[in-house]
Image (spheres, rainbow, N blue to C red):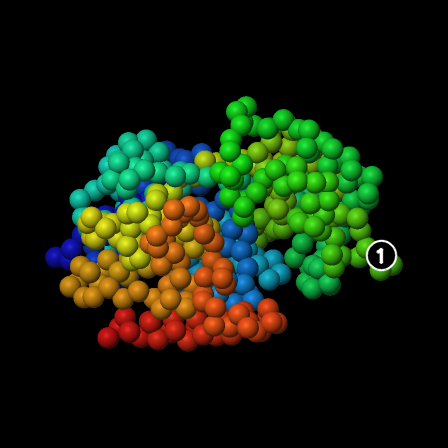
Amino acid sequence: MPQTVKVIGAGLAGCEAAFRLAEDGLAVELYDIKPKAFTPAHSNTDFAELVCSNSLKSNDVYGNACGLLKEEMRILGSLTMAAAEEAAVPAGGALAVDRQKFAAFVTERIKSHKNISVVCAEVGSIPPAPCIIATGPLTCGALAADIEKKSGGGLHFYDASAPIVSADSIDMSRAFVGGRYGRGDDYVNCPMTKEEYAAFYSALVSAELARLHSFDKREIFEGCMPLEVMAARGEDTLRFGPFKPVGLKDGEGRGYYAVLQLRKENMEGSAYNLVGCQTNLRFGEQKRVFSLVPALRNAEFLRYGVMHRNTYINSPRCLNADFSLREEPRICFAGQITGVEGYVESAASGILAAIHLSRRLRGEDVLLPPEHTVCGALSRYIAAENKNFQPMNANFGLLGGEFLRIRDKKERYRRLAERALKYIREYKISLCR
């Protein structure tokens, strides 16, 4: 009988971990509270639920570190990347997916695997080894308390999601389809004049927040900055951020003052996400404020934006670079709870935790990915001594400074990516020896 490993949590990290362990011949018990219960961020009964169709971010392998990480994951046999390919929707250079199809694909692969048993139950404490804890940033209750006790204290930050509107409620007489610089037709663009933008901005910065109490601004994760927090930095901040009009012109070649872009939320194009408009406004305020964008004056909101308090552990204090607990290496953590930030990064950590635990259980040495790969860099980041530990996205700054003398950023990133892909392919071969 193969050894049984418990995996707690069926998000991206947990599903990646369970699938990899099962593919290695280990028996897996995957625990999740669905469909009996849901976290505040989830409503789909399937596993691996994404909050946003664009949660997987850029697909540019040689110009974006998250795009590079996805290619590394493909090389390592990622279930997330297989699901994304199956459920992809047009989104220019981004890897956007139909969220329902994506989750259904992952769920089917998990439930049909001969080595995986799914258990619908709430886990109140860290199970005996061997196990992988991948309960995500919304971990709460008795399990959160047990994790905090055994990991030396929990940390947290806030992030937010954007509203979604129905496609047929968008006023296309005030919008147009197209990508920046004429590249593709994957976005609906909602332009605003200076006066229209001023009215929108005024309403946004004076709108009522959903949370009645305030929180420390240092707790807001920069990559998911609520629109109203960003706007508070100055009236033109949004025009240099999510509302930037760069590369978008009318039929006569004239530019716009500000443009809100909408992106398909599903394959059918029946719903659109407000790009960059993650928010913590009260629901009624969201409708009032975003309806001031001319193309959205009659918009039907299918989902309002929400903000969540996300928890992560102090990984440098309690985890090794193979995502194992220092006091018990056969207990691993994976996902955003470790301090890797983002769905892609979370999924990657699930693959890596499973690779390392599988080797450990077979009596083999743990092999970390090379430090000049994104997988290797993130692994080392979560375990390196850091008095001000914060969640980290994939970025080229983690990959070493050998190419910093190359002044052209595109060339520098290309060289970093080529080196990373060479090393990750060699790493995959070394795992099979």
Residue 285 screen position, x and y as percent: 65, 29
As drawn, 228 above or below 174 = above
Q: Farthest residue toward the left?
A: 1
Amino acid type at image mark 1: Arg
Is residue 56 found left or right of 200 in the rendered image? left
Is residue 388 found left or right of 283 in the rendered image? left
What residue sits 74% from the left and 59% below the top?
247
Depth check, front residue: 161 or 98:
161
What residue sits 80% from the left and 51% below the top?
256
What residue sits 50% from the left and 55% below the top?
56
The residue pinned by badge 1 equals: 254
What residue sits 74% from the left and 33% below the top?
202
Q: Is residue 5 visible?
A: no
Q: Quadrant of the C terminus?
A: bottom left
Residue 31 screen position, x and y as percent: 28, 43
In which image quadrant can residue 21 be found? bottom left
Residue 18 screen position, x and y as percent: 29, 54
As drawn, 54 above or below 135 = below
Q: Secondary structure at mark 1?
A: loop
Crowd band around label 1 with a 10 angstrom C-alpha radius: few (<14), some (14–19), many (20+): few
Residue 290 screen position, x and y as percent: 69, 36
Q: Quadrant of the N terminus?
A: bottom left
Depth check, front residue: 75 or 145:
145
Q: Is residue 26 visible?
A: yes
As drawn, 55 above or below 35 = below
